[in-house]
Amino acid sequence: MTEYSPFQNCRWRGLVHSSWRSALAELDAWLAANPGTVLVAKRTRRVFRANTAQGVVYVKVIRSLQEGGSLFKKALAAVKWYCRSSRAVGVLNISNAMLAQGIGCPEPVLAARRRNAAGWPEDIFISREVACPSVLSLVLQQPEGKRQEAILASAGRGIARLHNHGFVHGDCIPGNLCQAPDGSLVFLDNDRTRITPVFGAEGARLNNLIQFLARLPAIANRERLVATFLQAYAEANGEEAMFGTKQKDRLMRKLETRLALLAAKRARKVQARTV
């Protein structure tokens, strides 16, 4: 069982992996000494990859939840961010719960929150690198045919296993799922991953499938890959009949709606760039 200790430094409060306690004792100084390679730099969050003496880690600093949207959405997100408990600590807890069940995800190193003089919170989450290719990159790299189908079948079984162990992923897209050498999945970006809700469990699991399928690349044999993925998912659940005509029609309708929304979103971004 991985051991974590309470972490306190300046205004930071949270949990730290016992093997990193000394290295991260002065967190702000460590951040300054390990700027790494910046992967995301937005007003609300910053993500970078740092190569340290104890291995490669990813660092995510979160300052707010909502980047864009209406004034109402921004205000609501601000209230949630201010009042709710630390998202970083929540990710550490759900990640450790997944690891305890044998579900692959990045191993947490540190999760902490601090508040400024006005009480506004800032979170930091540090995790070890997962050195496995994403499902998205594997699908794009492989020639069309049996190899792609094997990747999608493995993804279907992996997501079924996640669901069977009582979890639903927060952003279940091919780029957030890595495939280990043994074919098992490693789930990245678990900011919104949670225990399966008592009410609405079927809808939450269905949403994961739609998230995944909606983000599959537009390749020639896409329909066959979708069918392969769904069949593998159903078989892994021991519910081969779960995608009968009625259930499959419902899923495909929701998938088409999601695809249309994503297409409209892309079109708005293109229009905004041209203007």
Image (cartoon, rainbow, N blue to C red):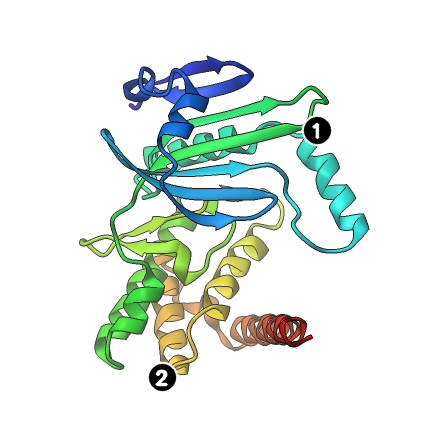
Q: Which residue is mark 2?
A: 221
Q: How many marks?
A: 2
- Can the viewer see residue 55? yes
Q: Quadrant of the C terminus?
A: bottom right
Farthest residue, direction left:
181
Cα separation, mark 2 vs mark 1, equals 47 Å
Quadrant in the picture for residue 122: top right
- Can the viewer see residue 166? no
Q: Is residue 121 toward the left or the right of residue 155 in the image?
A: right
Residue 220 at x, y percent in the picture: 37, 86
Q: Is residue 272 above or below residue 184?
A: below
Q: Is residue 129 above or below residue 266?
A: above
**Circle 2 or circle 1, nearest the eye:** 1
Q: Is residue 252 toward the left or the right of residue 72 in the image?
A: left
Tag 1: amino acid: Cys
- Residue at 61% over, 50% down: 200
Q: Is residue 34 toward the left or the right of residue 118 in the image?
A: left
The circle drawn on residue 62 is none
- Residue at 31% over, 72% down: 140
Tag 2: amino acid: Asn
Say few, some or many: other residues with alpha carbon within 10 Å of mark 1 (under 14 / 14 to 19 / 20 or more).
Answer: few
The circle drawn on residue 83 is 1
Residue 272 at x, y percent in the picture: 67, 71
Residue 19 at x, y percent in the picture: 27, 20
Q: Nearer the viewer, residue 125 or 118?
A: 118
Q: Quadrant of the N terminus?
A: top left
Quadrant in the picture for residue 259: bottom right
- Residue at 61% over, 27% down: 85
The secondary structure type at the circle numbered 2 is: loop
